[in-house]
Amino acid sequence: MRLAEHMSQLGTESAFDVLARARALEQRGQSVIHLEIGEPDFPTPAHIVEAGKRALADGWTKYGPTPGFPEFREAIAASVSRTRRIKVGAENVSVVPGGKPIMFFSMIALVEPGDEVIYPDPSFPIYESVIRFLGATPIPIPLVESRGFSFDLDALSRQLSAKTKMVILNSPANPTGGVISREDLGRVAEMVRHRDLIVLSDEIYSRIWYETEPSSIASFDGMLEKTIILDGFLKTYSMTGWRLGYGVMPKWLADAVNLLTVNSNSCTASFTQRAGMAALEGPQDCVVAMVSEFRSRRDAIVKGLNAIPGFRCTVPAGAFYAFPNVARTGLPCKALADLLLNEAGVACLAGTAFGAHGDGYLRFSYANSLANILEAIVRIQRISLRWAR
Ligand SMILES: Cc1ncc(COP(=O)(O)O)c(C=O)c1O
C-alpha cells in the first residue's frame, strides 16, 4: 500500500529533527545548549494553571461548541479589537487547538490548484508545506536584512497577479525576529486593497516586541474584510503544550474554518479554554516580565554573536529569535549548524530550514536562560577557530 500522492508534497519543521539529534547526543553524555526550539522556557503562569485545574475539577471535560465557548470568543474579540484598534465580534472568532490549524484550515478553505500564494522567505516552513499540499503555487518574497527583515516591497508588487489568492504576512517574524513597520504595512495594504485576495496575518508573536508595538494590517482602511488574524495563547502565555489558538476573520470565512473544525477536531479542549479565559482576564504582568527577560537575553545574544568572527547579527525587534548572517564564515549554514551541534554542543537551525533566502543565516532561539546563552557564545567563540583566520 502506498501513501496518497499529496503526502509527498508535505514539508516539516526541522526544529523537531534537530531537537531529536540533540537529545540523542545528550543521551550519549554530551552537553547540549538548546537554542533550536521556538517555545518560551517559562512555566505557564500559576493563575492560568490554577484556572485549568479548577476547570477540570468543575467538569469542563466534555465537548464544547465547535467555534469555542461564546464567552471566550467574546473575550478574544474584545481583546483583539482593543490591541489592533479594529472592531470585531465573537462571530469573527474561531478557537482552534494551536496556531497551525488556522494556517491549515484557512488555506484549505480558500486555496486550490492554479492559485498562487505569496509568503515571506525565510519564514515558518509550514506555510510553503500547506501551499504545496493544496496543489497551489508558492511565491516566496525575499525578506531584506538591511530593512530589519521586512518585505522586499518591490518584489511583492511585481509578484502580485490575478492568480494571487492569498498573501501571508508574519510580524513579528519567525525566524528573523523582524517586525514589518506600519509604513510598510500601509504600502502592502495599498497594493492588495482592491484585489480579490485574502491576507493571512500570522500575529502569533504579537505581544513579544521590544521597541515599537507592531501594527496589524487588519487596522488599515478596507483590510478588515480581507484579513485573517492568526494569534493564540501559545507564545504570549507560555502555553505551547496547551494547544490553544484562534483566528479572527470575516464571518463567512470563520464559518468555513468552523466547518473544517467539525470535520477534524470537533472542538478545542474545554478546560484549556477556561485557562485561556483566565489568561485574558487575569493580570498581564507575567507577559511584561517575560518580554523584559527576553529583551535582556536578546541584547546579550546579539552582542555575543556580533563578536564571533564571520557573524553579523541585526537587532531583532520582536519574537525571541536571533538570525545572524554567517556568510562570511565561508561555511554553508547547514554545515555550520551541524558543526555547532556536534562539536560545540550548541543546537540551532540553519537558515535554509526556512526557505532558500535563509541561506547564509542561522536561527538561534533565545528561549533559554541568560547563563546558557552566554555559555553558548563561549562555545561558539571557541570553535570559531575552525573558520576564522
Ligand atoms: C510563525 C508561527 N506561526 C504559528 C506558530 C504556531 O504553531 P503551533 O500551532 O505549532 O504552536 C508558530 C510556532 O512556532 C510560529 O513560529
Image (cartoon, rainbow, N blue to C red):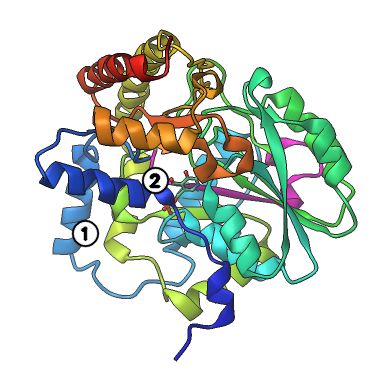
How many marks can you see? 2
The residue positioned 48% from the left and 83% from the top of the image is 3
Horizontally, residue 180 falls left or right of residue 299, namely right
Residue 69 rendering spot, x and y as whole percentages: 41, 63
Q: Nearer the viewer, residue 80 or 293?
A: 293
The residue positioned 63% from the left and 23% from the top of the image is 145
Magenta region: 218-235
Q: Nearer the viewer, residue 378 or 6?
A: 378
Residue 244 can be seen, yes or no: yes
* Mark 2 or 1, nearer chain start: 1
Local SS, label 2: loop
Residue located beneath label 1 in the image: 55
Q: Amino acid at mark 2?
A: Phe
Q: Which mark is residue 95?
A: none
Q: Amino acid at mark 1?
A: Ala
Local SS, label 1: helix
Which corner quadrant of the image does residue 254 belong to? Answer: bottom right
Instruction: Tell me the CA gap for discs 2 and 1.
Output: 17 Å
The residue positioned 72% from the left and 41% from the top of the image is 141
- Where the N terminus falls, by quadrant? bottom left
Residue located beneath label 2 in the image: 233
